[in-house]
Amino acid sequence: LLPIMASLFARSRPLLERNGQTMMTNNTNFSSSILDRIIFRAVQPTDIPRCYQIESSSYPEDEAASKSALQYRQHHAAPFFRCAFLIDNGGNTSHNDISSISNGNMGGMGSPTIGGTTSTSSSISRPVKSTPMNLQQTLKGRIIGYICSTRCSSFTEEAMKSHDATGKILGIHSVVVEEKYRNFGVASAMMRDYLSAMERLNSKEGNLKVKMEKIVLMAKKPLLAFYVRNGFRAMGLSSIVHGQEQWFELERDLPTHEDANKHKCFLLDSFADVATVGSGNPAGVVLLDESPGGVTSNNSFDDEELDDIMEDADDNNVAPVISPRGVEWMAAVAKEFNQSETAFIWPLPNAPASSPTAYAIRYYTRTGMEVDLCGHATLASAAVLLGTKQVEGNNVTFYAKNEELQAELIVSPSSPPSLTTAASSNNNSNASRIAMDFPWKDVSLIPSGGEDHKAVLNMLSNAFFGSSNKAEVESDLTAKFCAFFNPKDQSHALFSQHILGIGTTDEKEDLFIELTEEGFDLLRGIKVDYSALSEWLGYSRGVIICCVAGKDSSEGESGGNRPGCKTAIDFRSRFFGPKVGIDEDPVTGSAHCSLGPYFGTKLGKKVVIGKQESDRGGLVECILNQEEGRVCIVGTAVMTISGMLSMPI
């Protein structure tokens, strides 16, 4: 490889590692004193000898950049060459491993005259928590580290040979800290300053004629965690061979400074009936540029998390790595949206070739709890990406925590013919009809007469006709309702007349209860004691109550996307989720992973349509593929709000 490329590939190694491990100092006070005395500024021509001194002492001869290479970068790409300057503390340094930088005692590190002064004529910045100092003077000290980059049009060996002022990629050549000052947080502080400076430079106030889009670099495995903590994505193993060790490619999107903490956000009604205003299940969607929380000041990955990062990188895994700060931020935003679920989506640049348009997706409830899968939030996310042309084509693949989900914008009618399939066929220009590929979930019935069966009956009795609910029952329904839910009837004989089956879905996620249609209708208008629905410990998420739709119900005047036409409804349902902070969910797409297969099998159909009968209501079409264990869930999403989220990560 050419010397300039060898410099690029090896530059990030001498940061924090010692004996192959990332080190942390126990001397917090000394580390703080170092950081308090650092300023960051652009490298000047007179600084090159000092930078070269650090470079040549930190790398093997065949990897170190030449002085002429550093001079080239400073001359042609000066704004992208920044250093950490340690201000002289007057010889009061007390740490044994660091010699005083005053009085000319450099501990064998060279002449104090090299890079020994700076002034406010340079672009100076300070760490946020550093102590105040007067910068209107010439400051004595020394450069202890630097980061330098050049712009290029593509991240290739040829493109990195020279600086292209119009290149949209910023390629980092060197990230280096002098050995005596490693393991004190200097590299982290220097990188945070550098990223902030690049965002400012890329903003409207910057003087760049052509804005940059991303920062790229290459690093070896021991430093992957450092760069992930600073917002870089591990793209996988590099195809470039340089020495015996493997190299990993990393990149980080570079937003403009003013847009760094703003994200597109949306509110949509999923599984809506466009003939009815305000139907469907509202879901929030936040569209991100990258995995949230990459840049964090606390760097709180533990060893186990770092091992996971390395394993993902080794396997070229598409599953995204999310920092603890990112998890906290998503939970806070979901609470702010206050919807049953808010989805967070961002592109996966290292997705497999089979999924060229791939996005990570995560779901959080209004209480800040993460859930593994949410159908209506997935539908809303697909409508955002496909319906508003955020991506090319009509297909997108979502990678949830445990599932790979396919979504398609439908442009032609789909079975059954009573439901239209293209948003363009209705009068609502904000509506998109989406087909989603979800996993098939079976229902395992609980044997009648067993302890679990009795416990569920008691729970339902308490929830729907406990002492707090008696006043809520309309007088003409009281007799029927008391007969339906009679806690004193230990045999549950009357109750069992309307209970056709009690079971749980796969992994005991939901409690599944099939009623007669008469029993289902008896629950209308009843105030539910949601806390009572949490009594039974045999399920982890929600309670599904459902029934086969009779003739009168199956031909209601609700036309999906065509007002006035009659829709053939196969089953009716309600969903309660007190264990995940949801009293009653308006429409639950993921529940139809089990509802669709259950009623498809029961009715002998491969396509079934469900109506979820909450206050808002909604329609869900299920196309069943038992051979592959998949359920195609089809629904309409109507966008109601779009804007910018200004909650900083």
Image (cartoon, rainbow, N blue to C red):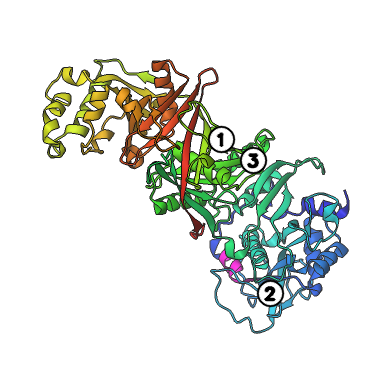
The span from disc 2 to disc 3 (Cα, nearest Å) is 45 Å
Secondary structure category for the residue under label 3: loop
Q: What residue is drawn where x is 73% and y is 72%?
A: 105
* Magenta run includes residue 267: no
Q: Residues within 10 Å of mark 2 (few under 14, many from 20)?
A: some
- Name the chief secondary structure element in magenta: helix
Q: Earlier in the sequence, mark 1 or mark 2?
A: 2
**Residue 374 at x, y percent in the picture:** 45, 37
Secondary structure category for the residue under label 1: loop
Residue 303 seen in this snapshot: no
Q: What residue is drawn where x is 26% and y is 27%?
A: 520
Pointer 1 with pointer 2, Cβ within 8 A:
no
**Residue 296 at x, y percent in the picture:** 55, 56
The residue carrying mark 3 is: 393
Q: Residues within 10 Å of mark 1 (few under 14, many from 20)?
A: some
Residue 123: image tag: 2
Q: Earlier in the sequence, mark 2 or mark 3?
A: 2
**Residue 154 at x, y percent in the picture:** 78, 51
- Residues drawn in magenta: 30-39
* Three-letter amino acid code of the residue under disc 1: Ile
The residue carrying mark 1 is: 410
Secondary structure category for the residue under label 2: loop
* Three-letter amino acid code of the residue under disc 2: Ser
**Quadrant in the rendering for residue 122:** bottom right
**Residue 143 at x, y percent in the picture:** 72, 69
Query: Position of 257 compared to 648: left or right?
Result: right
Q: Nearer the viewer, mark 1 or mark 3?
A: 1
Pointer 1 with pointer 3, Cβ within 8 A:
no
In the rendered view, tell whether residue 535 sits above or below residue 123: above
